[in-house]
Image (cartoon, rainbow, N blue to C red):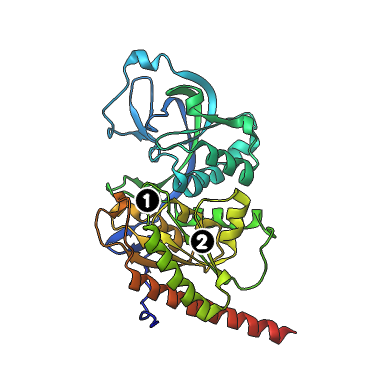
Amino acid sequence: MALPPPMERFASRRAGSEGRRTWGSLMYEEREAFVSELTDVFVSGVDGVLFDARCRIFAIGHDEETRYYESLPPPQFVATASPLASAINLVQVWGLAPYHIIAEAMSRVYLLQRVWRADPSIPFLYGGPGNSDRLVRIMLESLFDVAPSRLTPMNSLGALVRVGKLHFADWRRMSPEGVPVRDDGRLYHYLPPRRVLQQLHSYYAQRYKGVAGATNDQPRILLWLSRGGSEKRQVAPDRESGLLKRMTEIWSTHLGSETNVRVLGKFPPFADVHRLFYTAAAVAGVHGAGLGNVLFCQTGTHVVEVACQQPHCHYFGHLSMALDFQYWFVPLTPRHAHLQRFVEPPEEELLGVVRNVAEEVAAAAGRAGHATAGEL
């Protein structure tokens, strides 16, 4: 079978002292991370909004009032709020879907370590749209040794909580003069700053240094993230099977054994997830939460995203560029692909990218082999 032609790597451009990066028509400007607190505020677990007793809404990234939300709760509703003396805020406007837990919420936990490690009585308040209670607990307990007794989901307290001192971490754009400025309305506030992601990535790597099954050998595994059974962006089973067959043929041509291609559908226990991603040379899949786990990959890993073209879908391009992964962008054609139950990846383009990645991984493995032989 003739192999598809090689593809150009999707180029990321980085320029300017402001840390601007572009991919496609999108642009990201680096932000400053900071830690702060608000006094006597209400936290809404329904939508992640913060407000005070006079129903003024706060954008925590600016420590000031903002008027972006109109459906304010009535006074009698405020009076029923559950009280907390203090809390670490992990209630996010964008919710706690898996990406927002792995990259966004854990970035905030990392930044707030001095606060919550110094006072073991402060609870972690989490919840919001798309809440995933189990994943929050697993990550806080496994990665940061947070005692289960400190984890306080919003649904255990009611829809509204009044907090005497709310500790939070966030990020904001800065003007050339060093003054905080508001976002310009683009959907990228949920993208953590590059420096924070790099620190979190290093923390994860040190935390799982010497993880079972990890070796110092050059990674050779291609990890395909299947969305079979998901409500959105599945590849039809027969088509996915054919695609994986050709992908395996390409990968094994350059790297030997067919066992070097792994398919990850239903995710295994957390420790196994870390090991699988850490030992992968390349991770590929259709846009979805599973790609957030590339935070556990080694620097230089290839990330191949069959991507949606909606502006809000650049989570994993941002994550890959921030962590110096080799990012490959294979766009789905329909503009509304994010909402489709089934999608059709551009097969020849995707396989062309896989061939390029396989060639680079094989070359890197060869160089590592020569270096080892020279040391003997």
Q: Which dot marks residue 263? A: 2
Q: Tell me: 203 left or right of 8.
A: right
- Could you say which is closer to the camera, residue 249 or residue 209? 249
188 above or below 263? above
282 above or below 159? below
Q: Going by the picture, which residue comes out furthest to the right?
A: 376
Q: Quadrant of residue 375?
A: bottom right
Q: Which amino acid does label 2 sit on?
A: Val
Q: For the N terminus, which image quadrant? A: bottom left
Q: Which dot marks residue 77? A: none
110 above or below 224? above
Q: Earlier in the sequence, mark 2 or mark 1?
A: 1
Horizontal and vertical percent for residue 344?
A: 31, 61
- Could you say which is closer to the camera, residue 146 or residue 183? 146
**Residue 15 visible to an observer of this rendering:** no
Horizontal and vertical percent for residue 303?
A: 45, 65
Residue annotated with mark 1: 174
**Residue 257 visible to an observer of this rendering:** yes
Q: Tell me: 175 left or right of 206.
A: left
Q: In which quarter of the image is residue 235?
A: bottom left
Identified at 55% across, 61% down, the residue is 297
